Image (cartoon, rainbow, N blue to C red):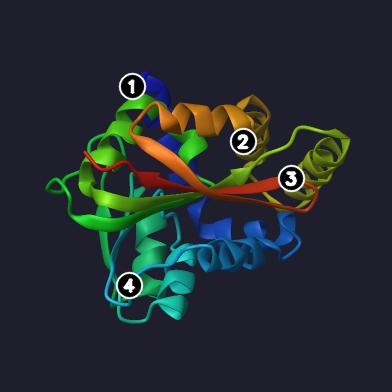
């Protein structure tokens, strides 16, 4: 498992320089739209402490700051190359190289933890959910956004995404893995049940594009 995690990290390090460009291409420019819609589902205090795990190049952080300009936000990722890009894009934001399954923060530090299109690539998901619960305050929120339904429309999208990746990327194997990770990921209903086993309850769920993308807003249960 540790070896696999290292392989995934190296994959993201390798694709980091071209990641934003291809993300825009493959998502047909929709990834920022769904991230904005997901943020609208939250109702945070203006000065909330927010942690973005698997932050990558930091796109979600820009959206969080748009809706909550006075919030204190930290981004973490295990890919050093991704964070180098994020730091250049958002020099005023605190970024840290960390594994989401071993967070270097005190208990009950954050009002909200966000994750967009990254949680599925974490190998130790159970440990990560325990860590998210640990660093969240009682009643704090976990916003999870990722691919959802596995129906025919989703399969067509995956094929088109692979075609675009093959045409535009020198690291086609990385994008083959990413599509495979989507297909192997739990559907939203099962995902929510899994979250609920780790001291969370569902507050809101919203699906986009015929369910291809799904957002779940979970709340940490009060101890």
Report the mark closest to the observer, 2 or 1.
2
Residue 45, which numbered label? Answer: 4
The picture places residue 100, in percent across and down from the top left corner, at 31, 40
Residue at 35% x, 30% y is: 198
Q: Earlier in the sequence, mark 3 or mark 2?
A: 2
Residue at 83% x, 39% y is: 159
Q: Earlier in the sequence, mark 1 or mark 3?
A: 1
Q: Do the numbered discs 2 and 1 sit on residues whose CB atoms are within 8 Å?
A: no
Report the mark closest to the observer, 3 or 4.
4
CA separation in Å, label 2 and label 4: 27 Å
**What quarter of the picture does the C terminus occupy?**
top left
Residue 199, which numbered label? Answer: none
CA separation in Å, label 3 and label 2: 10 Å
Q: Tag 4, which secondary structure? A: loop
Residue 2, which numbered label? Answer: 1
**Circle 3 residues within 10 Å: few <14, some 14–19, many ≥20:** some
**Circle 2 residues within 10 Å: few <14, some 14–19, many ≥20:** many
Q: Tag 2, which secondary structure? A: helix
The picture places residue 58, in percent across and down from the top left corner, at 43, 63
- Disc 3: which residue: 212
Q: Do the numbered discs 1 and 3 sit on residues whose CB atoms are within 8 Å?
A: no
Residue 53 vertical placement versus 2 (above, below): below
Q: Earlier in the sequence, mark 4 or mark 1?
A: 1
Q: Tag 1, which secondary structure? A: helix
Left or right of 4, for residue 166: right
Q: Earlier in the sequence, mark 2 or mark 4?
A: 4
- Disc 2: which residue: 188
**Circle 1 residues within 10 Å: few <14, some 14–19, many ≥20:** few
Q: Do the numbered discs 3 and 2 sit on residues whose CB atoms are within 8 Å?
A: no
Which of 162/111 is in front? 111
The picture places residue 25, in percent across and down from the top left corner, at 72, 60
């Amino acid at each position: 498992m540790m070896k696999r995690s290292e392989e995934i990290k190296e994959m993201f390090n390798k694709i980091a320089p071209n990641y934003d460009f291809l993300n825009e291409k493959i998502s047909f420019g929709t990834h920022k739209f769904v991230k904005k819609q997901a943020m609208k589902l939250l109702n945070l205090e203006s000065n909330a402490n927010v942690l973005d795990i698997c932050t990558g190049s930091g796109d979600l952080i820009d959206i969080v700051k748009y809706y909550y300009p006075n919030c204190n936000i930290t981004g973490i990722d295990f890919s050093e190359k991704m964070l180098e890009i994020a730091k250049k894009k958002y020099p005023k934001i605190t970024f840290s190289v960390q594994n989401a399954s071993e967070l270097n923060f005190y208990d009950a530090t954050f009002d909200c933890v966000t994750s967009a299109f990254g949680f599925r690539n974490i190998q130790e998901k159970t440990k990560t959910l325990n860590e998210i619960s640990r660093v969240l305050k009682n009643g704090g929120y976990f916003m999870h956004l990722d691919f959802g339904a596995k129906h025919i429309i989703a399969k067509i999208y995956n094929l088109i995404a692979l075609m675009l990746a093959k045409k535009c990327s020198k690291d086609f194997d990385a994008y083959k893995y990413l599509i495979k990770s989507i297909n192997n990921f739990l559907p939203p209903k099962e995902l929510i049940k899994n979250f609920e086993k780790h001291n969370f309850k569902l507050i809101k769920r919203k699906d986009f594009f015929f369910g291809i993308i799904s957002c779940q807003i979970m709340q940490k249960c009060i101890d």
